[in-house]
Amino acid sequence: MFDWIRENLLTIGILLVLAAAVTAIVVSLIRGRKKGRSSCGSGCAHCPMAGKCHQQAAPEKK
């Protein structure tokens, strides 16, 4: 068992660094959502999904 760990120590280290980076990104996104921040970061003027993301309320007919 220890021989396998010793032989793959570099691979295990890289895996741990990548897992920490992914975890940090996910935590940051979750905290941003809770604070009301969006993932897009700028205005919707040039966004092709602007109509889907922030739908405008239809005017009421009288």
Image: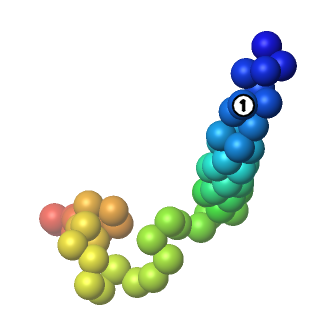
Residue type at the position of mark 1: Glu
Question: On the image, which quarter does residue 15 sit in?
Answer: top right
Residue behind mark 1: 7
Residue situated in front as seen by the camera: 38 or 57: 38
Q: Residue furthest left?
A: 61
Coordinates of residue 30 in the picture (x, y in percent): 65, 51
Taking the spot 26% from the left edge, 84% from the top edge, the residue there is 46
Question: On the image, which quarter does residue 1 sit in?
Answer: top right
Image position of 54 (left or right of 32):
left
Residue 23 visible within the image: no
Taking the spot 83% from the left edge, 19% from the top edge, the residue there is 2
Q: Secondary structure at mark 1?
A: helix
Taking the spot 17% from the left edge, 65% from the top edge, the residue there is 62
Image position of 1 (left or right of 33):
right
Coordinates of residue 16 in the picture (x, y in percent): 72, 42
Instruction: Count the labels in the image.
Output: 1
Image position of 56 (left or right of 34):
left
Coordinates of residue 60 in the picture (x, y in percent): 22, 65
Taking the spot 21% from the left edge, 72% from the top edge, the residue there is 48
Q: Residue furthest top?
A: 1
Coordinates of residue 4 in the picture (x, y in percent): 73, 21
Residue 62 visible within the image: yes
Specify few, some or many for label 1: CA neighbours under 10 Å numbering under 14, 14-19, or 20 or more.
few
Name the image colouring.
Answer: rainbow
Q: Is residue 32 above or below residue 18?
A: below
Image position of 42 (left or right of 15):
left
